[in-house]
Amino acid sequence: MGVFTMPSLGSDMESGRLVEWLVAPGDRVNRGDVIAVVETQKGAIEIESFDAGIVHELTAPMNEDLPVGTPLAVILAEGEEPPAGPTAPTATAEPAPETEPVAEPERPAPAVPVAASPPAQPDAIRPASPAARKRAGELGVDLTGVSGTGPGGAIVLADVERAAPTAPRPAPNPVEEMRKAIAAAMTRAKRTIPHYYLSETLDVDPAMRFLEERNADKPPTERVLLGALFVRATVLAAAKVKEMNGHYTEESGFAPSKEVNPGVAIALRGGGLVAPALADAVNMTLDETMSGMRDLVSRARAGRLRASEMTRGTITISSLGETGAEAMTGVIFPPQVALVGLGAPHLRPWIVDGAIVPRHVVTLTLSADHRVSDGRRAARFISEFETALKTPEAL
């Protein structure tokens, strides 16, 4: 029997809000199937099952903040019999005392009997659509007092609008909440990770000429951007310099990763930042890398990322794109041990074969963890990155 629990989607996550089930009791699920949607400070994340089998029971309430590790569902393996008793404790059950009861002397009954008030019962959890829950939060509507007109009495958006008070509370600011989460995570990272930084300015004219020729007769949906070359160069360098690719924890130290799963920093519309990862990117072609990046950007901005994409990253790339500042220095995303920061290309005088010529250059800044590597290993990583970028047709 597998107990599906609230997963941790980052070092800064303490709890999540279950907002949607995509399965019901009796459904068959495979490992990796998306079965629920959890809302965190970084947006709505699709949660995948770690077990295969039959959904026996959904044990967690909807639309409540639940700590990481809270049981959400029970999944039975193929052919496994359901447990005889309840699989999750009820909220009102009290454990029986383990000590023997002590006899008390008889006491006279009170002259006037006192009626004990029954304990208050928690309000029933009413089914509601995700849109209704979101709007209720914006308007300050208590769903326990709303009558639902949807299927099975579920509360829908129109029910919430009808129940809204005349002077609604200000809507919560998701961007502000995300900023708080990012600030907390980065503060912790800077406090606990001994960062060091190496920078190098690289000639990217060969890469830009390659892209110009390659994209000349391609529709926009099939064009490759410079960022995809940066991801490929990072992946190839990380595969050769393993001290930059993996996870560090206080309990077990550094564990290099067998795969290179580059986290791609994505700026969300309206503000905020997430860094979902591409899986096993070493084995991707350049076109597959570009396609994977487009997919991540699209789903990140639609709030449909998966839990595994938020947790499997082994190194992160953060690029300012094709316009902006010359350089950036990033903070490592724990438990990772390195982050590649890339400024925008700028036209600068450059020496080529003894002559000064105009070239497009990019400044790379590598942030690395001194508990795992040192300057020589970081310098080798940058050298491998530069070598890969000099032959973009081989990426």
Image (spheres, rainbow, N blue to C red):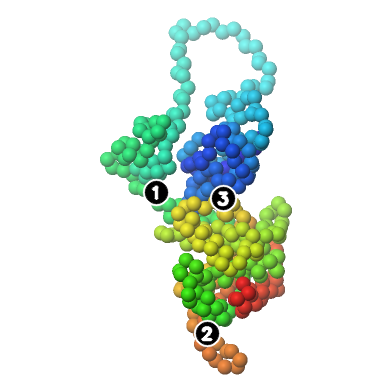
Secondary structure beneath label 2: strand
In this view, the residue farthest toward the bottom is 355
Name the residue rendered at 50%, 70% in the picture.
223
Amino acid at the residue labelled 2: Arg
Tags 3 and 2 touching, CB below 8 Å: no
Residue 130, position as x, y percentages in the image: 43, 42
User: In the rendered image, which residue does mark 1 sit on?
Assistant: 172
Crowding around mark 3 (Cα neighbors within 10 Å: few <14, some 14 to 19, many 20+) is many
Residue type at numbered disc 3: Ala
Which residue was labeled with disc 3?
A: 307
Report crowding for label 1: few under 14, some 14 to 19, many 20 or more residues within 10 A (C-alpha): few
Q: Label 1, label 3: how many angstroms apart (C-alpha)?
A: 24 Å
Secondary structure of the residue carrying tag 3 is: helix
Q: Which residue is mark 2?
A: 359
Q: Nearer the viewer, residue 106 or 340?
A: 340
Which quadrant of the view contains residue 337?
Answer: bottom right
In the figure, is residue 30 to the left or right of 140?
A: right
Residue 11 vertical placement versus 60 (above, below) = below
Q: Is residue 91 left or right of residue 99?
A: left
Q: Seen in the image, is 296 located left or right of residue 197?
A: left
The quadrant of the picture occupied by the N terminus is top right
